[in-house]
Amino acid sequence: MGQITHGLRAALSNPRVYSAFQNLLGAEAFRKEFIQNHIRPYSGMKILDIGCGPADVLNHMDGVEYWGFDTSEAYIAHAKTTFGPKGNFFCKELRTSDFEDKPSFDVVLAMGLIHHLDDDTARSLIAMACKALRPGGRLLTFDPCFEVGQSPLAHYLIRRDRGQNVRTKQGYEALIRPSFSIYEIAVRHRRWVPYTHCFIEATRAP
């Protein structure tokens, strides 16, 4: 996985430090908006969260059936302690065999994950997500993005992200196309702590 985990960035491996730092940058409001406008949860919705981190998304969702995967023991331990029976948490890299005995998912999440992956790994993960979805189910992703004319501060911050595979909108779209024929992609600029994200909603064909 292409990310920097040494120096000051090593502190972000601590789930409490990670969540606190993210919230300082406005992640809580961002997360609520993403859940409301993109996930649109309902009771019984089956959600697979790849690279779930400490699963902070569950702070704002009730009644869903949630499976979270992450390779960080610290993040998964924190998620289990914090959310307990609200979710199913696994400390491992997701494989196709991990969801063969599970129901097809309504939503697969890859939030802030793809920019940590090289192209081949990202395409494989997206193909796996497509297989995990029911027909009509959706893959939802967002990642930092380089964009012509973006704020110089946003560009500076994104350059220093732990993930080493930040792409343009066209770069992310090229990863989605082999697995999904139905998708929407949008770039949005955040003003509070300037930042640029690329959002993708890809739907498995009926």
Image: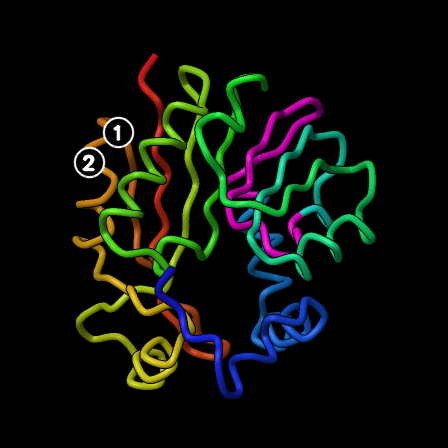
Q: Is residue 53 magenta?
A: yes
The residue at which mark 1 appears reads as 180
**Which residue matches tag 2?**
177
Quarter where residue 190 is shown: bottom left
Residue 178 sits above or below residue 4 on the image: above
Residue 15: x %, y % from top left = 68, 66
Q: Is residue 126 left or right of residue 30?
A: left
Residue 172 position, x and y percent, is: 24, 51
Specify the amino acid type for callout 2. Arg
Image: magenta residue range: 36-57
**Location of residue 178 in the rendering, given as x and y in whole percent from the top left corner:** 19, 33
Q: Secondary structure at mark 1?
A: loop
Above or below, 105 against 127 in this view is above
Closer to us: 169 or 80: 80
Which residue is depicted at the point 68% across and 74% down?
A: 20
Nearer-the-camera pick, 43 or 100: 100
